[in-house]
C-alpha cells in the first residue's frame, strides 16, 4: 500500500573544496543508518544542503536508497518500521510510503536486530532497486519466512513476493539486461527477470557475497564480505569469469565507474581500485583514519572522482582517480553514513 505522509526538514553545512569536483553538477544523497537521516551533500563544497529526519519514536535504522534517473525521487528503506519511504528530493520531504504484508513475518525475532535487542516481526525490508523503466521497485526481505524479494508495482501499489531460497540485504538491476542480481547469505547470487519476476538461475559465489554493481561492458561485480574477494560474472552467460583477492579483508560494497574504466571495492579500512580491462588492482586507498572501516563507494558522473562514505567514522572521503590519492578533507555526514547514491542535477 502507498499513502501520503508529511515530514520535517533540517539543514546543516560544512565548508570544504577539493578542486577535482568543483565543476561537477551533482550531489550525494547519503543514508545515515543510526541517525535515521537522509542528507544531501554538495561534494564541491562539503556542505550538507538538505536533511530529512525519518519520523517516528523508534525508527531503528534507516538503510538503503534508490534514486530515480531524473533525480527527483528517492526510495529509502526503514526495516524496523516495515516500510519504504518515498522522498521528494527537490523539497526533501516525504511524499509517500510503501507498505506490504510481505514486510512482516509471523513471529517475533531478534535475528536481524542490529541495534540493541528490540524484538520485531519485521521481515527486514532492506535493499531497494528500481527496474530500468522505473515502473517497479524491488525490496529484499532477508528474514521473511521464506526469504526473498518483494516486487512493488509503483503505479498500482500491488506487491508480489519472489522466493529466493535464502536472504540477502542488497540487490541491484543490470541496466542493459534488466536482470536483478541478489547476493545471498548462502554464497549464491540469485538472478531475477524483472519483466516476468521469475528467478532465472542461481550462481555459486564464495566469500559471503553482498554488494553488486555493473560495468558498462556487461560484467557483474560482486563484493565478498567474509573473505574480501571480488567476483566478476559475465551477464550474458551468468558464469563466474574471475575472482580477485584484494589485500584488505572485511565487509564493504562495490561500484563501477560510468566510463567503464574502474571498479571500486571496499574492504575494511581500504578501497581497492580495479582496472576493468585487466582485472588487476591498480591502487589500494585508505578510507578510514584507523583500522576500522565499512565503506560505500560512489563514482562521480565523469568517473574522475571516487567518493567513499564510511559507516564507522560517520563521514566521506574523496579520491582523485587521475592521481590516485585523497582530494580535500574528510566530510562529516551523519551517524553510520553508508548507503544512498549520486543525484545528477538536470
Image (spheres, rainbow, N blue to C red):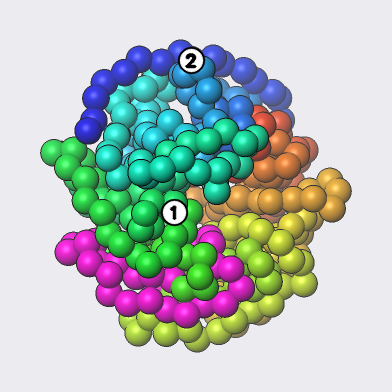
- Magenta-colored segment: predominant secondary structure: strand
Q: Residue furthest right?
A: 290
Residue at x-position 46% and y-position 59%: 168
The residue where tag 1 is placed is: 142
Position of 287 compared to 33: left or right?
right
The x, y position of residue 255, in whole percent, is 54, 59
Q: Residue at x 74, y 66 (%)?
A: 249
The foreground one among 261 and 124 is 124
Taking the image as shown, residue 195 lies to the left or right of residue 296, namely: left
Looking at the picture, how far across and down is residue 165, in whole percent? 37, 67
| Residue at left offset 43%, top offset 64% | 166
The image shows residue 239, relative to residue 92, as above or below, that is below
Question: On residue 295, which mark appears?
Answer: none
Specify the segment rendered in magenta. 189-218
Across and down, in percent, residue 199 comes to 27, 70
Q: Which residue is mark 2?
A: 9
Seen at 44% across and 60% down, the residue is 167
- Residue 173 makes an appearance in the image: yes
- Asked if the stretch drawn in magenta spans residue 126, the answer is no
Dot 1 falls on a residue whose secondary structure is: loop
- CA distance for labels 2 and 1: 31 Å
With respect to residue 185, does 20 lie above or below?
Answer: above
Where residue 253 sits in the image (x, y, percent)? Answer: 59, 58
Query: Helix, strand, or loop for circle 2?
Result: strand
Quarter of the image containing the N terminus?
top left
Q: Is 229 placed above or below 343 here?
A: below
Amino acid at each position: 500500500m502507498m499513502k501520503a505522509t508529511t515530514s520535517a526538514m533540517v539543514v546543516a553545512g560544512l565548508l570544504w573544496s577539493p578542486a577535482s569536483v568543483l565543476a561537477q553538477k551533482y550531489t550525494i544523497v547519503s543514508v545515515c543508518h543510526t541517525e535515521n537521516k537522509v542528507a544531501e551533500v554538495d561534494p564541491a563544497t562539503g556542505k550538507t544542503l538538505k536533511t530529512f529526519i525519518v519520523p517516528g519514536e523508534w525508527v531503528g535504522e534507516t538503510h538503503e536508497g534508490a534514486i530515480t534517473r531524473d533525480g527527483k525521487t528517492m526510495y529509502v528503506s526503514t526495516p524496523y518500521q516495515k516500510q519504504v519511504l518515498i522522498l521528494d528530493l527537490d523539497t526533501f520531504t516525504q511524499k509517500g510510503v510503501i507498505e506490504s504484508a510481505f514486510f512482516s513475518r509471523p513471529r517475533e525475532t531478534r535475528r536481524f536486530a542490529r541495534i540493541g535487542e528490540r524484538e520485531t516481526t519485521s521481515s527486514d525490508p532492506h535493499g531497494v532497486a528500481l527496474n530500468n523503466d522505473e515502473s517497479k521497485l524491488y525490496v529484499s526481505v532477508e528474514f521473511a519466512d521464506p526469504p526473498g524479494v518483494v516486487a512493488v508495482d509503483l503505479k498500482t501499489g500491488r506487491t508480489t513476493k519472489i522466493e529466493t531460497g535464502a536472504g540477502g540485504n542488497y540487490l541491484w538491476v543490470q541496466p542493459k539486461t534488466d536482470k536483478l542480481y541478489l547476493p545471498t547469505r548462502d554464497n549464491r547470487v540469485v538472478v531475477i527477470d524483472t519483466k516476468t519476476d521469475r528467478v532465472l538461475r542461481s550462481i555459486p559465489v564464495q566469500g559471503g557475497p553482498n554488494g553488486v554493481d555493473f560495468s558498462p561492458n556487461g560484467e557483474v561485480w560482486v563484493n565478498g564480505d567474509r573473505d574480501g574477494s571480488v567476483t566478476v560474472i559475465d551477464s550474458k552467460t551468468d558464469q563466474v569469469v574471475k575472482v580477485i583477492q584484494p589485500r584488505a579483508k572485511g565487509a564493504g560494497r562495490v561500484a563501477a565507474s560510468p566510463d567503464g574504466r574502474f571498479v571500486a571495492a571496499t574492504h575494511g579500512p581500504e578501497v581497492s581500485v580495479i582496472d576493468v580491462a585487466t582485472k588487476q588492482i591498480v591502487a589500494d586507498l585508505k578510507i578510514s583514519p584507523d583500522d576500522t572501516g565499512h565503506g560505500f563507494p560512489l563514482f562521480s558522473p565523469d568517473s574522475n572522482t571516487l567518493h567513499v562514505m564510511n559507516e564507522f567514522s560517520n563521514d566521506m572521503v574523496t579520491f582523485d582517480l587521475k592521481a590516485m590519492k585523497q582530494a580535500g578533507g574528510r566530510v562529516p555526514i551523519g551517524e553510520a553514513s553508508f548507503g544512498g547514491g549520486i543525484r545528477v542535477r538536470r
